[in-house]
Image (cartoon, rainbow, N blue to C red):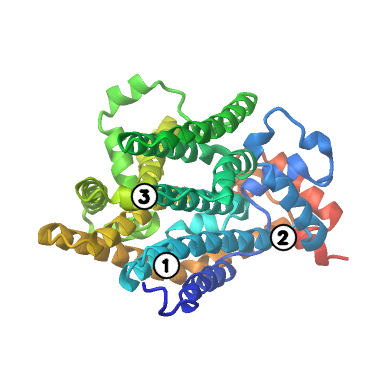
Amino acid sequence: MKQNNGKKGTYLIPLLGICICLSYVLAATQDVVYSDYIRLVNSYLPDVWNPEKFFVADVLTRIPVNFLERIINVTFFGYSTTFDMALGVLCHGGAAVILTAYCRERKVGWGWYLLLMAVFFSLNKWEMLTNGTGWCHFLAFAGFYFHYLLLDRAFQRRQTKERATKGEKLGLIILPWVITLGTAGPYCASYSAVLLLTYGICFLLEKRGGKSSCFDYFVYGIHVLIPLGLYLVSSSFAVEDHAGATGRGIGEVLRDNLLFFPKFLLKGFSSMVMGEEVMMDALTRLDAGMGLCYLAGCLVIAAYVIALWMQVQERLYERSLLPLMLIFAGGLNHLLILGARWIFENSDYGMSSRYALQYQAGILGIILTFALFFQSRRRAGAIKTAAVVISLVILAGNGYTTYKEFKKAPYRKEYGCRVEAAALRYREIPDEELEDLFQYHHGPEKIRQALGILEEQRWNIYGGEQ
């Protein structure tokens, strides 16, 4: 997009995306505590100011920014899940603004930009949007994209024999500390890996060009490794409860189901074309097995391969690092989620909506790579045709997913109302029904304990009771 055309209007697109996501959240949710909130209430409420709950060995795994947000929520909003969800949407919109700034700087065409935003605000991530406990993950990704943009700007200055500004240098040093230790949580793994890989590429490119300043990237890398190391130390003290894990070793799993890993990955890639529930509904109607799902997964893998070919063939990474960094991030997240979730021996986990935010980075990088490639003079008709076809399929799938999610919103709202009604009479509901309704299978006594805390403090749905 040309910077002198629609300069201010460009930023109306992220605003529109925020409005769409907020309208979905309001249509699909009820301001009531359930699922992950049960654990959080029991762990941190009512005394959110208690330093003993913050100064613990595994504090970094608890994502420190949550402590501040929890204080604000309790103090001003009576522990509202809607506040958390709205905050998540706003952080998501902030990430869209960062990508919009990049598109303006790189003069990305309007068609590619609108495709990028359509995918970015797709409701394939509905589960993250409607679970307020995940608001900080949207903040983390906004931080990732801002860091990637800052690195891209600094690298381009050096390519044109300019010096990176003091602000850019300071940002490249400070951001890993703030993001890794304050907001990223377990997502810092892919974030740190992407940065280290990119710094290695930058070092090689500048060393080949005979620049003595290439060793700056070692300094930046150290400021990635130290906070990452601190996070790993902190996480070693965490006690994890993998409810539902089979407990079998990887050898046993592969011996019984050799195709488990490929199926997991293909389903994960397919979720970037169409959301899990929408995909499963379509497969049921077509009575076509999982073939369409695996085909969609292969299509996304093909998109990765084509984008990487474009990056190498046209040396697009020398023009801009950010798309390649996003591709790295998406690919790494697919592998990391496989590494963390294979223990449940359910390949459908790979396409869960809760992972769409992580997977999405790769698709965004692919779209931006296509956009930069189309700016080049190279004809490459077949490869450009393939890029357009893949882009249209992704757009159609994401658009259909968003449409279907808005259709499902009233039913999700209805479920929230049932949870709210149950919360108002939680003492008399049978244990099994209570666990099923609140989607928390760690003992009904924990659910009653959490709701009792809220009732005593008159927070959340109990705020209006006399």
At a point 71% along the width and 27% down the height, the residue shown is 57
Q: Which residue is mark 3?
A: 362
Quarter location, residue 234 = top right
The residues tagged by marks 3 and 2 sit, at their Cα atoms, a distance apart of 33 Å
- Taking the image as shown, residue 219 lies to the left or right of residue 316, namely right
Picture layout, residue 342 above or below residue 358: above
**Where residue 453 sits in the image (x, y, percent)?**
81, 48
Q: Is residue 273 visible?
A: no
Count neighbours of disc 3 (C-alpha within 10 A) and say few if under 14, some if 14 to 19, many if 20 or more: many
Q: Nearest the camera: 89 or 436?
A: 89
Quarter location, residue 31 = bottom right
- Label whose residue precedes the other's in the sequence (3 or 2): 2
At a point 59% along the width and 70% down the height, the residue shown is 26
- Taking the image as shown, residue 268 lies to the left or right of residue 437, namely left
The residues tagged by marks 2 and 1 sit, at their Cα atoms, a distance apart of 37 Å
* Contact check, label 3 and label 1, Cβ < 8 Å: no
Single out the mark in the foreground, 2 or 1: 1
Single out the mark in the foreground, 3 or 2: 3
**Where residue 46 sits in the image (x, y, percent)?**
82, 47
- Label whose residue precedes the other's in the sequence (2 or 1): 2
Picture layout, residue 242 above or below residue 70: above
Q: Residue furthest right?
A: 466
Q: Which mark is residue 104?
A: 1
Q: Which residue is mark 2?
A: 80
- Secondary structure at numbered mark 3: helix
**Where residue 160 sits in the image (x, y, percent)?**
38, 52
